[in-house]
Amino acid sequence: MRKELFFVIIVGVSFLLFPSMKIVQDGKGDTFSDCVGCPDMVEIPIGSVYIGSHQDEIGRKKGERTRIKAVISKSFAMAVNEVTLGQFRMFMEETKYKSNVPVYKGQPLVGCNYFDGKGYGYISEHSWENPGYPQREDAPVVCVSWSDAKAYCDWLSKKTGRKYRIPSAVEFEYASRAGNSAPWFWGTNPEQACEYANIGDSALKDKYPSRPIFPCTDGYVYTAPVKKFKPNPFGLYDMVGNAWEWTNDCFTYDLTNAPIDGSSYVGTKDECNFRTPKGGSWISGISWGRTAVRSKDGADYKSFMLGFRVVAEL
């Protein structure tokens, strides 16, 4: 009873703090795919929406952007879903691409970062082909770095003749929100998360008892096939959960002068050694599984919960 009352109170307070601000009209844009095996793309309409988080938002992290109105005046297309294992495999087989090996304190980090329930650490045997758990070809590829994602975009651009790239943090959040300024594009209720996202849920709790979770069940411990859950009003799937997604922004703690027009933040060389993943993943609870949340990871870092999707210029 107390637990149920707790979430009722949270939802009620959240509704007052984050009323839906649908500045952008709901509606799916034109869809296309530039080649067999290429990502399915949907045109994202121009418009504006409040991004960032309110000071009292549930689970707000230090360093999140204070709420501000972002204005997108140039239309772009975004992949309907995260790049899948099968799509990334096609890139790897065609290019024979070799990924950079990150270095930490003078030591190479071979493999991919993994969580065993107690702590994190690189495991040399893990990779995009083996992240440490079973992966279907239609699940999002993980254990890929920002550098890997950029290489995929460069290959896709050359293959199709259209400019593909990694989305900026503002583009990603704008597209994820689809006009809604609440903690999630579906609104303020964390109990609805499992209708729209593969996030930390009761299935995850059985595997990792110490992890905080959403109060629902999505049926997946690890990644789920893309398009398994309901899309947002722009027709995008898994903008919250499934896999953290790289954005192109160099990481900065101070967002005071960061762009709000959809362009990427480009800072100092030290800042650009780190990039800004967004969206949360299958292991994220409420605080890390929100639209405004962002992370900081090295450009060559690889994690069993981190993938990407692409955008295309129109």
Image (cartoon, grey):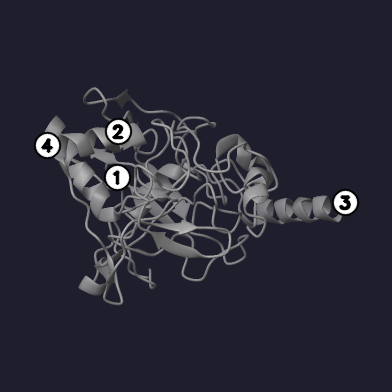
Q: Nearer the viewer, mark 2 or mark 3?
A: 2
161, above or below 61, in the image: above
Query: Which numbered disc, 3 or 1, marks the residue that appears first in the sequence?
Result: 3
What is the spatial separation of the Cα atoms under label 2 and label 4, in whole angstroms?
A: 16 Å
Task: Return the residue nearer the eye: 78 or 208.
Answer: 208
Query: Which numbered disc, 1 or 2, marks the residue that appears first in the sequence?
Result: 1
Discs 1, 2 touching: Cβ within 8 Å: no
What is the spatial separation of the Cα atoms under label 4 and label 3, in whole angstroms?
A: 58 Å
Discs 3, 1 touching: Cβ within 8 Å: no
Q: Which residue is disc 2 drawn over?
A: 87
Q: What's the residue type where badge 3 is placed?
A: Met
Question: Judging from the image, what secondary structure is the residue with disc 3 in?
Answer: loop
Packing grade of label 2 (10 A; few <14, some 14-19, many >=20) is: many
Question: Judging from the image, what secondary structure is the residue with disc 2 in?
Answer: helix
Label ID, residue 158? 4
Discs 2, 3 touching: Cβ within 8 Å: no
Q: Nearer the viewer, mark 2 or mark 4?
A: 2
Q: Nearer the viewer, mark 1 or mark 4?
A: 4
What is the spatial separation of the Cα atoms under label 1 and label 2, in whole angstroms?
A: 30 Å
Q: Which residue is disc 3 drawn over?
A: 1
162, above or below 16, in the image: above
Task: Return the residue nearer the eye: 125 or 291.
Answer: 125
Discs 1, 4 touching: Cβ within 8 Å: no
Residue 218, given in percent of the width and then of the height, sits at 62, 38
Q: Which residue is disc 1 drawn over?
A: 73
What is the spatial separation of the Cα atoms under label 1 and label 4, in whole angstroms?
A: 26 Å
Question: Judging from the image, what secondary structure is the residue with disc 1 in?
Answer: loop
Q: What's the residue type where badge 4 is placed?
A: Lys
Q: Quadrant of residue 113?
A: bottom left
Image check: 84 left or right of 268?
Answer: right
